[in-house]
Image (cartoon, grey):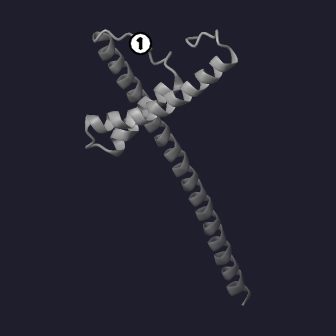
Amino acid sequence: MEEIESQLKSQVKLALDTMTLSEEKYRSETEANRLMDTHINNIIEDAKNKLARKCHELNRAYCKALGDSSQLPWESAPEWVRQSAIAGVNFHIDHPEARADSSHESWMKMKVAVTNGAKVIHIRRLKLDPGVNLLS
C-alpha cells in the first residue's frame, strides 16, 4: 500500500511539475509573441514613415520643377505636413485601388482643417497686435 501511495505521489508531483512547466512555457511563448508583434508593428510604422518621407520629397522635387519652392524638406516641414504624408501612405494601404483624385481629396480635407485653424490663430494675433508679422 505504501508503495502504491508513493508511486501516486510521484505521478502527481510529475504531473504538477509538467503543468508548471507548461504554464511557464505558455507565458514565455505569449510574451515572445507579444514582443514579436510589437517588433513587427515597429518595423511597419518605420517603413510607413520612410515611404511618407520619400513621397514628400518626391512631391517637393515635382513642385520645385514647376517653379514652386515653397515646400520645405522633410526635416523642416511642419508636423501637420509630415502627418499628412503619413496619412496619405495609410490611405493608399487601406484603399489600394484609390485614384489620385481620391488621394488629393483626402489631403485637401486635412489641409483645410489645418489652414482654418491657422487662420483663426492669425486673426487672434492681429487683434492682439495689429503690427504683428504673421510670417514669423
Q: Does the image show residue 46? A: no
Residue at horizontal 35 percent and vertical 36 percent from the top? 105
Residue 29 % position (x, y): 54, 54
Nearer-the-camera pick, 56 or 118: 118
On the question of residue 130 being in view, the answer is yes
Which residue is label 1 attached to?
A: 70
Up-down relation of residue 79 to residue 133 (above or below)? below
Q: How many numbered marks, from 0 up? A: 1
Find residue 9 and report its horizontal and vertical position in percent. 70, 79
Relative to 85, residue 37 above or below:
below
- Judge left or right: residue 101 versus residue 53: left
Mark 1 surroundings within 10 Å by alpha-carbon count, few (fewer than 14), some (14 through 19), many (20 or more):
few
- Amino acid on which the number 1 mark rests in the picture: Ser
Give the residue at the far bottom of this rendering. 1
Q: Quadrant of the C terminus?
A: top right
Between residue 108 and residue 82, name the one nearer to us. 108
Which residue does the image show at 54% across and 25% down from the upper left?
119
